[in-house]
Amino acid sequence: MAWRQLFLICLSAVALLSNVEEIFMQESDALNFLKKHSKQSPRFQDEVNVENRQKLWADELRREYHEEQRNEFENFVEEQNDEQGERSREAVEQWRQWHYDGLYSSYLYNRHHI
């Protein structure tokens, strides 16, 4: 059995080596390929530059949009807090007016008798 497996391995190795010539190209073809593809053509570089400018422009628009949304939300929250504070002050003032008996000045109202 071992000889048979070894024989099959040798046959597959020979088959691989016979295809090596098909895998590699001629030296002149390889040099031509490298000459053509070693530098990017100016047209291709211009296309890359245009694409990068478009990406930067889209990023800037996205940044401006999110900044505007954040500012609007911050203004909304600030307005809500101001309104809540005003309602609280009004409620406290109404409570003080309702419960004030006129005997003590308002700044002493919540204090107990000294």
Image (spheres, rainbow, N blue to C red):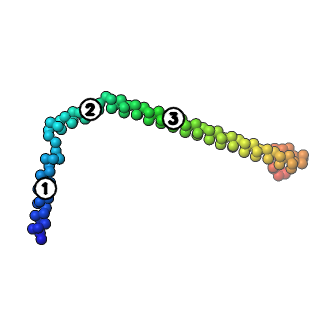
Q: Are marks 2 and 3 in contact (CB under 8 Å)?
A: no
Q: How far apart are labels 1 and 2 at the CA level?
A: 37 Å
Residue receiving disc 2: 39
> Which tag, 1 or 2, sits closer to the chain's start?
1
| N-terminal label among 2 and 3 | 2
Instruction: Name which residue lies at 11% across and 60% down.
Output: 10
- 20 sits left or right of 104 in the view: left
At a point 13% along the width and 66% down the height, the residue shown is 5
Callout 2: few (<14), some (14-19), or many (20+) C-alpha neighbours within 10 Å?
A: few
Viewer-nearest residue: 44 or 114: 44
Mark identifier at residue 109: none
**Residue annotated with mark 1:** 15
Q: Which amino acid does label 2 sit on?
A: Lys
Q: Mark 3 points at which residue?
A: 61
Q: Where is residue 41 in the image (x, y as percent from the top left)?
A: 29, 30
Disc 3 marks a residue whose amino acid type is Leu
Q: Earlier in the sequence, mark 3 or mark 1?
A: 1
